[in-house]
Image (cartoon, grey):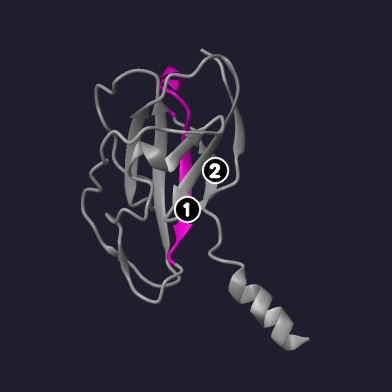
Amino acid sequence: MTILLLAGLLQAGPPPPVVTPFFLSRNVEEGPAFYVECRNTTAAPISSGSWVWPLDEDAIRIDGAARERRGRVGPGLVMDILPGGTWRGIIELRQAEPQSGFGVALGANVRAAFVVPLITGPHTIAVRCGDTWSSDLPFYWER
């Protein structure tokens, strides 16, 4: 019985990324934002600037549709995320080209602004870390 339980745990794969709404104290018309946490489930450190983390639009899925790869967001200063450690990022879905950028906050490794025009109504967002997608997180947007 114990062997079956251990085998099941080993096959479960890495935990999915965690996506949480991130409320901005600036102009809400810039778009919704989300705080993302991804765990390093490998046995080695991974750079916070690695392709594993969602630093490109193709690592974001809106309303079930993956975004097109358009170029990476620069991670700024990089550091190693140790095995078992957590990479954190803030993803902003801007409604127009950003005129300025904002620094990271709340222990995030990067803050990324992507232009993702949204219509008023319900939406979902999911984020991929490595090969693992988060669950769809429902949110509502009103212009």
Which amino acid lies under the numbered mark 1 shown in the image of this protein?
Glu
Camera-side residue: 104 or 129? 129
Residue 53 lies within the magenta run: no
Instruction: Indicate whether 88 appears above or below 23.
Output: below
In the rendered image, which quarter is residue 47 located in?
A: bottom left
Camera-side residue: 54 or 88? 54
**Residue at the (41%, 53%) spot, across then down:** 88
Report the span colored magenta: 25-40
- The x, y position of residue 104, in whole percent, is 32, 44
Could you say whether the residue bearing mark 1 is in a helix, strand or loop? strand
In the rendered image, which quarter is residue 90 located in?
A: top left
Residue 28 lies within the magenta run: yes
- The x, y position of residue 51, in whole percent, is 31, 53
Q: Is residue 42 visible?
A: yes
Could you say whether the residue bearing mark 2 is in a helix, strand or loop? strand
Q: Mark 1 points at which residue?
A: 37
- Report whether 35 appears left or right of 121: left
Q: How many labels sit on residues? A: 2
- Report whether 143 appears left or right of 92: right
Pointer 1 and pointer 2: residues touching (CB < 8 Å)?
Answer: yes
Q: Is residue 106 visible?
A: no
**Residue at the (42%, 28%) spot, across then down:** 93
If the image is split into quadrants, where does the N terminus sit? bottom right
